[in-house]
Amino acid sequence: MASPPRVCVVGGGGFVASWLAKLLLSRGYAVHATARDPGIHTFPAPLLRCDPKNAFLKELDGASENLRLFRADVLDYDTLTAAFAGCEGVFHPATPVPGDKIVDPEEALTH
């Protein structure tokens, strides 16, 4: 039996991304989902340390077989490439959220 196609969903714990991950899992995809702090480096693994914001992902149908969580920052190339490894496609519904008032929006959006 062939391996399922693998894709990455950036920001997997977010509202849009989690629904997308659920849809992809239901259609037989293997999903790499990123989170700023999943509480663990990869899932499946013991989830005792899992960030509660992302814990619901382990309950998705197919998650135990086809979901891996990766700690990643959308502004950190190395963490993203680790999550993208082996993927045929990437969905990027996540966006960085600045913590302070943006003085120069154009500068903030390009970095």
Image (cartoon, rainbow, N blue to C red):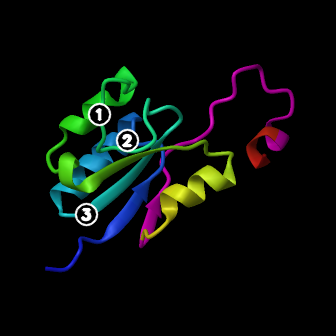
Q: Which residue is labeled 1 in the image? A: 46
Label 3 element class: loop
The quarter in which the N terminus is drawn is bottom left
Query: CA separation, marks 2 and 3?
Result: 17 Å
Who's the residue at 48% across and 49% down the image?
10
Question: In the rendered view, would you say 75 is above or below 100?
Answer: below
Let me know if residue 100 is in the magenta part: yes
- Which segment did they paint magenta? 88-107
Left or right, residue 95 beside residue 43: right
Residue ID at (50%, 62%): 84
The image quarter containing residue 31 is bottom left
Residue 77, horizontal then vertical, whole percent:
67, 54
Q: Residue at 28%, 37% (x, y): give it.
A: 57
The image position of residue 32, as x and y in percent, is 39, 54
Tell me residue 22's x, y (percent): 24, 47
Residue 82 vertical position relative to residue 72 in the rendered view, above or below: below
Task: Out of 56 and 42, give the one closest to the viewer.
Answer: 42
Q: Quadrant of residue 42?
A: top left
Report the amino acid beneath label 2: Val
Residue that mark 2 sits on? 16
Looking at the picture, tell me which residue is in the foreground, 21 or 67: 67
Q: Amino acid at mark 3?
A: Tyr
Q: Please name the residue that numbered disc 3 is placed on.
A: 29
Q: Which mark is residue 109?
A: none
Which three-letter amino acid code belongs to the residue tagged 1? Pro
Image vertical order of residue 4 relative to residue 23, above or below: below
